[in-house]
Structure formats: C-alpha cells, structure tokens
Amino acid sequence: MSTDRPSMVLDARTPPARPGALPAGVSVRVVTADDPGLPSVLAVTRIAYGDPGSVRALARTLTEDGTVADIAGEIRHGRRVVAGAFGADGQALAGAHCTVDGEVHTVGTLPAAQGGGLGYEVTRAVLGEARHRGQRHFHLTAENPASARLYARLGFRAVPEEGEAR
C-alpha cells in the first residue's frame, strides 16, 4: 500500500469511536444547510489546506461565488454531512465533510487550533451523523502520516492499493 497517502476504510463492524476531550469553550456540531456557521466551516477547511486569507474573508468569498449555496443544497438533499468545531466566540476552528457514498474528505483545522483533538472530533461527528442516516461503509485517502494516525484512532484501516499484494 502507498505509505505516503494510504487509502483507508471503515466498515459497519467497527464500533463508533469514543469521544475525546475538547479544549475549554469549544463545541462540535453537525452543521445544517441553514446554519450560519457553514460558510466559516468551509473557509476553515480551505485554509487548513493552504488557501490564503482570513476565515471571515474566505467565508465571504465562498458565499459570493456560490460554494456555500452548493454545499447547503447537498446538505439539504442528504448528499453531504458537514461538522464543525467552534470556539466560545462562535469562530469555526475545524471542519469535516462526508458525502453520500461514504467518502470522508476535507477534514481540516486552523493551524492555531491544531493538536487539540478537533480534527478527531469533527470527523467523529460526521461519521456519527452519516451512520445515523444509514451509511455503513466509509473511505478516504489520508493526506499525510499524522492524518493516517488520526483516522486509525477512529477505526479506519489502511487497504492495499489495486495491484498490490494483500
């Protein structure tokens, strides 16, 4: 299996992950289509992957360019689950997405909030909501060794890539 970006799966036999401790003042929730936090959660995940700018400015851009409306439509029609971690001031700190086919993607935490378990908790929230809606199998590609360790703690296991020995 590719060790730099392993494909990982989680199936119905794996019990839900246990909750971790959140930093003081931080809450995690599934974000609905009409949640005012949706634009900032989408912005945080983009910033975590290298997009420049502030959460506020990028959230405004994503709203103006229709991205927020598109994702809200997917949420409203049951094609996507989004979760966010929010500070006591309501600022989004981390976010995660899961699509209807069980693909977990775009898990990201603001650099200043990394290391506090927020990526774990938003991913756990997305998985829990998707399971509640009937999804039983999940898949993802871990972007780096740290994310592979996080996903393993949630119960994901690495799978050999096509053509590799099992």
Image (tube, rainbow, N blue to C red):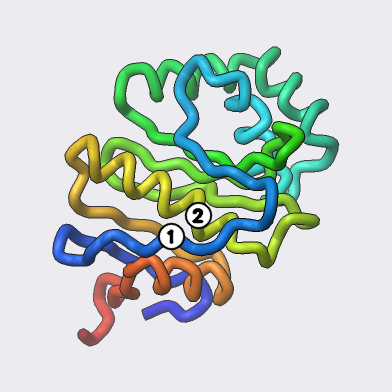
> Which amino acid, by three-letter code, is at mark 1?
Pro
Residue 68 in the image: state x and y as whole percent.
58, 20
Residue 165 in the image: state x and y as whole percent.
23, 86
User: Are the residues flagged by discs 2 and 1 in contact, CB closer than 8 Å?
Assistant: yes
- In screen coordinates, is 127 left or right of 88? left
Tell me the quadrant of the picture where the C terminus can be found. bottom left
> Which amino acid, by three-letter code, is at mark 2?
Glu
Quadrant of residue 1 within the rendered picture? bottom left
Quadrant of residue 63 within the rendered picture? top right
The secondary element bearing badge 2 is classed as helix
Distance in Å between CA atoms under marks 2 and 1: 7 Å
What residue sits right under mark 1 in the picture? 19
Q: Residue furthest bottom?
A: 165
Q: Which one is in front, 89 or 85? A: 89
**Residue drawn at x 46%, y 49% as measured from the top left:** 105
The secondary element bearing badge 1 is classed as loop
* Mark before the other along the chain sequence, 2 or 1: 1
Residue 149 in the image: state x and y as whole percent.
49, 75
Q: Residues within 10 Å of mark 1 (few under 14, many from 20)?
A: few
- In screen coordinates, is 98 left or right of 161? right
Q: Is residue 5 above or below residue 129?
A: below
Quadrant of residue 87 within the rendered picture? top right
Residue 46 visible: no
What residue sits right under mark 2 in the picture? 121
